[in-house]
Amino acid sequence: MTTPAATGRGPLHLAAAIDQPGAYDAAPYTESARLAEHGALDFVTLGDSFARQGLDALAVLARIAPATGRVGLVPTVTTTHTEPFHVQAAVATLDWVSHGRAGWAVEVSATEAEAKLFGRRRAAPREALWREAGEVAEVARRLWDSWEDDAEIRDVATGRFIDRDKLHYVDFEGRSFSVRGPSIVPRPPQGHPVVVVDATTGGHARETAVRHADVALVRAASPAQAGAARADLHRRAAELGRDPGQLRVLAALVVDLGGGEQAARPGHGGGPLPTAEGPLYRGGPVDLADLIAGWHAADAVDGFHLTPVEPRRDLERLVNGTVSLLQHRGLFRTFYPGATLREHLGLARPANRYAALAGDPT
Amino acid sequence: MTHRPRTKQIHLAAHFPGVNNTTVWADPRSRSQIDFSSFEHLARTAERGLFDFFFLAEGLRLREHKGRIHDLDVVGRPESLTVLSALAAVTDRLGLAATVNATFNEPYELARRLASLDHLSGGRAAWNVVTSSDAFTGENFRRGGFLDRADRYTRAAEFVATARELWDSWTPDGPDGPDGSVGEPRPFAHHGQHFDIAGEFGVPRPPQGHPVVIQAGDSPEGREFAASAADVVFTRHGTLEAGRAFYADVKGRLAAYGREPDDLKIMPGVTFVLGDTAAEAQERAIEIRRQQVSPQNAILALEQVWGVDLSAYDPDGPLPDIDPDPDSTLVQGRVKVGDPRAVAEQWRALSRAKGLSIHQTVIETTSRQSFIGTPAAVAEQFDEFVRTDAADGFILVPHLTPGGLDEFVERVVPLLQERGAFRTEYEGATLRSHLGLPEPVRKG
Ligand SMILES: Cc1cc2nc3c(=O)[nH]c(=O)nc-3n(C[C@H](O)[C@H](O)[C@H](O)COP(=O)(O)O)c2cc1C
């Protein structure tokens, strides 16, 4: 099945990870995010896990929101040992403090060690945890809709601050939790902050991406592999009634730009090497630009999520080398025409599911 | 007398306007309760005024009245810790206090979030530990209303103790990182009544050692918890007499825990109205009360006491002569009126004595401002409260977002400074240093 909205090469989207092991203050993160913004990247990500040493990722990105103006901010927030209600409120708040630049990379906590930090439940198989993560994403999106955009009326004549008919209970019943709603946070500026799912981590992770992601990450060693993964995601999204044109698929690459301008490692045709951490690109910034341009020209992916091996060095080479070259060739934006992360990604602001219902007398 | 003791110093905090009718939203100067610019304005004003900290309240379920979402007051706020992380970028010295419920959170995650805020703000984080455990709020959470009211403080106390174990779990020093020594994690294990957890904490010891702990809750258990574990008490006792009694009671409980009176600061939440003359301040106060209590709000206030539907009553008419229903569930998500029959009788007596309507009675009895007067008079009263041990300072609750603190900072703070009762610059970098609190003792 071909879906017109999904075919035809769209603009290139680029994102970078700004993880920096051992950094416990804001300065290095601010510096990296500003550098990414200098390159007009769509968004930066910051990974998180209760097992890792490091600050709470969402807090770090909230801390740098006022120090940046355009770049999207996407922290990982896990769904296994956390409260869905708190998670959605924090992500919505990140969207408020960043004026519509928030995203949320959904992740699960699968280890026994993480379970012991909470002492509430045993470790469970990833499949089950991803099924739950899908439910958390679902309830989050409902809670983001639980306030209609124009619920606040400040009507002095009737003394009403809100029109309570525009606030909605979500009454979500999942397998492992239920939430009544509405949210305590009004609908965030983007309607829904951008949901990012790594679709390669397991069967149900891909299912969650198909159902809930605005951006899906795929790990592929060749444009053909990436293109097939994207086609699969788009097809399945369409089967669920989603517009596949509203699902961006980015190839996730670990990049090691330490080799200066020497050619990419021979024997892989300039393509990435498969490693335990996913496909690794090792070479110079110019060759990376060629790889990105080539995959994008082949219409294999909508863009790339790049994780520097050496945070500071590689991000600097990525932005000042690879990105500026892509800009020079007219393949990547040189400034942000929009203000929100959805606008950078060319994604529509979602309609409110409850507003649609309210207009329907049935 | 050989030497004059230094005047007892006043501590000041700024409460972001809340979701009750103290906050006037119908005023043309009132701005968004959710836009970051409002938080930034108020926080910067507080920092300009050299305040100790900025305070955010929390409610985890929207309030309901007669089974429907309460719509007459400001509704909706952002999540506190995330807002404070962002505010850390636009302030340098101001303490950043988040109210976070101990019932619907888990120690590992919250200790990590608080430690993160402390690191990201260079030692300015505080946690107001609240304990509501009602099933109504529980409907938004995995465990529902799992906790008996009687256990709310045993859980809170164990929660705070566990968080401190986690904050203390890194070694004091370790291999030098690029930004100096952060130490190394050591395994922790906590086996208690409420929490049974073990592992390694992911964040180095916070710059303050432990973020500042604030307690708000008034029952005997609440006071005991404050005396055992809190650095600051947020109270509602805003009059001189009630303040002194509360102060003496709570400070008197400290010795049993080996603590000094100065180790716990008592800060009532107060409102204020300023004017160029006493008469002008009174006029403004009346005007603000009228804004706070709309006719619809007057009926609602009455229903909160009576616990029954009174929508048929005319706000400009007399009070109902029926008796309140003490077991009512009309109101959800708010602190309940203690003795509804007594309050109803009091209100009726007042209405009879002065010939007041429902609307007038509610204006008269509720939301009275704590301090009304010229800047000089308010400064004098603040100083008296603190000198005579009715308080160690105040959490100011402005009635307007976000400009409600501007006038206080411009006109009252300089007078407090002239009296030698308030700092003229921040001496330290951390909230602990502003509050004059001791370094927390590392355990383990
Ligand atoms: C001054 C003050 C402020 C409070 N602020 C909050 C708040 O922001 N959020 C909340 O959930 N509870 C708040 N509470 C409620 C208390 O934390 C506590 O749950 C409640 O008072 C019941 O405890 P108690 O029986 O010890 O009074 C506040 C209480 C007081 C006295």
Image (cartoon, rainbow, N blue to C red):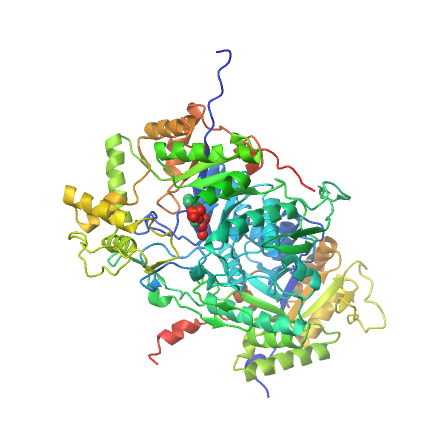
What residue do we see at 73% from left, 70% from top? A291
Is residue B316 left or right of A85 when viewed as pictured?
Answer: left
Whether residue B403 appears in this view of the structure is yes
What residue do we see at 78% from left, 44% from top? B175
What residue do we see at 50% from left, 66% from top? A192
In the rendered image, residue B269, in percent from the top left (x then y), is placed at 40, 40
Q: Please, which residue is most extreme toward the right here? A: A267
Q: Please, which residue is most extreme toward the top here? A: B2
State the residue in front, B89 or A169.
Answer: A169
Image quadrant for the C terminus of chain B? top right
Q: Is residue A269 above or below residue B25?
A: below
What residue do we see at 51% from left, 11% from top? B2
Identify the image quadrant of residue A305. bottom right
State the residue in front, A2 or B306.
Answer: B306
In the rendered image, residue B251, in percent from the top left (x then y), is placed at 48, 33
Identify the image quadrant of residue A278. bottom right
Identify the image quadrant of residue A236. bottom right
In the rendered image, residue B387, in percent from the top left (x then y), is placed at 42, 26
Is residue B193 left or right of B316 when viewed as pictured?
Answer: right
In the rendered image, residue B366, in percent from the top left (x then y), is placed at 28, 45
Q: Please, which residue is most extreme toward the bottom here? A: A1
Whether residue B38 appears in this view of the structure is no
